[in-house]
Amino acid sequence: MVQVLSASPEQTMAYGEKLGRVLKGGEVIAYFGGLGAGKTCFTAGLARGLGVVDDVHSPTFAIVNEYRGEIPLCHFDMYRVTTFDSLCSTGFFDYLDGRRVLAVEWSENIENALPAEHVIRLRIERGAGENERILQMTGDEAYENSWR
Ligand SMILES: Nc1ncnc2c1ncn2[C@@H]1O[C@H](COP(=O)(O)OP(=O)(O)OP(=O)(O)O)[C@@H](O)[C@H]1O
Ligand SMILES: [Mg+2]
């Protein structure tokens, strides 16, 4: 596990970008952390690191946004996805094709369906100040090293 403190949305994006640069495709970034934690913000940085060309925005209503790029990114919001059937309808399992990266907001709701490998857990908690966030990453060494 590696933990960093972010003092601004820009800094959170920068940590996302650092991680994005070392991804190869096939990884699942599983976010844990409540409303307004900074998951979408982090994903915008992740997209930049992956060489994504499309704009990142919250997939709340669509449930999944697909972004094109050197490594394509699928961005999920599982806030309302609470059953196995509804998870299947999102295309989650089809997108696990080893080529794209999946960024999954509200992974709390689908934790049991996460694959056994290639999962990077990203926990975001609020810090003491209004703009402080504590970012915790748990994954393979190579990913964790992107923040060290
Ligand atoms: N250090 C920080 N890192 C990230 N966001 C921050 C930080 N400080 C303040 N913020 C603010 O917190 C909010 C984070 O919003 P964001 O949409 O990324 O959260 P989210 O976790 O995706 O929420 P939701 O569960 O509603 O989708 C933004 O308004 C952002 O400006
Ligand atoms: Mg969000």
Image: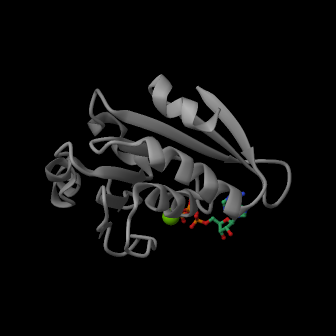
22 on left or right of 8: left
Q: Is residue 59 above or below residue 2?
A: below
Question: Residue 78 versus residue 141: which sits nearer the camera?
Answer: 141
Q: Is residue 51 above or below residue 111?
A: below
Question: Does any portion of residue 112 appear in the rendered image?
Answer: yes
How many callouts does the rendering have?
A: 0
**In x, y percent, where is residue 140?**
44, 25
**In x, y percent, where is residue 129?**
85, 55
Colour mapping? one colour
Question: Residue 96 versus residue 140: which sits nearer the camera?
Answer: 140
**In x, y percent, where is residue 137?**
56, 35
**What is the quadrant of the N terminus in the image?**
top right
20 on left or right of 147: left
Q: Tell which residue pokes out farthest to the right in this image.
A: 129
Q: Is residue 113 above or below residue 20?
A: above
Q: Residue at position x 30%, y 37% from top?
A: 114
Q: Residue at position x 46%, y 49% from top?
A: 20
**In x, y percent, where is residue 7?**
78, 54
Rendered-image quarter of ligand 1: bottom right
The quadrant in which residue 59 appears is: bottom left
Question: Does any portion of residue 33 appear in the rendered image?
Answer: no
**What is the quadrant of the C terminus in the image?**
top right
Q: Residue at position x 52%, y 41% from top?
A: 122
Q: Residue at position x 32%, y 32% from top?
A: 118
